[in-house]
Amino acid sequence: MKRRKSSLLLKTAWKNIFWIGLMHLLAIAFAIQTFTWGAFICFFILYVTTAMIGICVGFHRFFAHKSFTCASWFEKFLAFCGTLACQGSPLYWVAAHRLHHAFSDTHDDPHNSNQGFFHSHFMWLMRQQRDLGDPNEYQHYIPDMRNKRFYKFLGQNMVNIQILLAFLLYGIGSLFGHGWSFVVWGICVRLVAVYHVTWAINSLSHMWGNQPLMSHDNSRNNFILALLTFGEGWHNNHHAKPRSARMGLKWWQIDISWMFICLCRKLKIIKSVYMPGASH
């Protein structure tokens, strides 16, 4: 893989700054005063749905690394859940992640950890390389996905889908007398939490932990991050064996996303699961 020439040009991503900033401001301003246990349950269900099913299993292990195969309806479900995390379209997310693996911790890595914590955590999203800010450019990094119209639709309507979800949550919350509470916790607080645990894999998992496997970069295994990110914190394992559907390679390395994949495999929703050294 080779970076496009447009990667040399940087552009301030005002849409990213506005949206991410708005979610943080609303979460900080209203989270405490709108807290209810019902809203927290709503937050937790959507956190698992978007962070684990959408990002970890869907965008990451399925779309980016092709760690398993599945039915078309489940593929669309994974794409939809990932889009609810508001981290861009499946096309953009996979393009950025594949570049990360191709050039991990080098100049061409979009969130190169050698440029410091803040750059790898979120600043790379605010001051963005133009090849990742332009769909006509980053489609060259995802030849297997770029003609999927459903993924393009999700990307183009990502915010609209979030707004519709907010109306739905307000209606559900109103049944319990806490409409706005469900919106604040189900949208703003949940998005901020999912953003930071996802970003922590780009930053902290390349700075904090151990490196039992050879990966030729700064990737680390981190038990705490693995718990918060449903198994993604076994990041050195992942960089050493990127296509593996299982990131917690030892019996004691808790990988909840892998458990979900195993459950789906038993239900025959997922098949052809890739594991290093196995026959497929």
Image: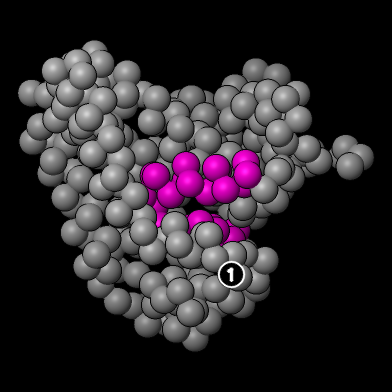
Residue 213 shows up from this direction: no
Q: Position of residue 137 (x, y in %)?
A: 49, 79
| Residue drawn where x is 57% and y is 48% of the image | 76
Q: In this view, does 242 lie above or below 184?
A: below
Q: Mark 1 points at which residue?
A: 146
Splitting the image into 4 quarters, where does residue 186 fall? top left
In the picture, measured across the screen, residue 238 lies left or right of residue 18, that is right
Nearest the camera: 266 or 234?
266
- Magenta includes 53? no
Q: Where is residue 245 in the image (x, y as percent from the top left)?
A: 70, 39
Nearest the camera: 183 or 254?
183
Q: In this view, does 245 lie above or below 182?
A: below
Residue 64 shows up from this direction: yes
Residue type marked 1: Arg
Q: In which quarter of the image is the C terminus?
A: top right
Q: In this view, does 121 lie above or below 48?
A: below
Q: Quadrant of the N terminus?
A: bottom right
Outermost residue to the bottom: 5
In the picture, measured across the screen, residue 255 lies left or right of residue 88, that is right
Tell me if mark 1 has few (under 14), some (14-19) or many (20+) residues whose alpha carbon lies within 10 angstroms of its own: some
| Residue drawn where x is 22% and y is 60% of the image | 17
Q: Position of residue 11 (x, y in %)?
A: 29, 76
Splitting the image into 4 quarters, where does residue 41 fall? top left
| Residue drawn where x is 55% and y is 42% of the image | 77
Magenta region, mostly helix, strand or loop?
Answer: helix
- Magenta includes 90? yes
| Residue drawn where x is 66% and y is 52% of the image | 65
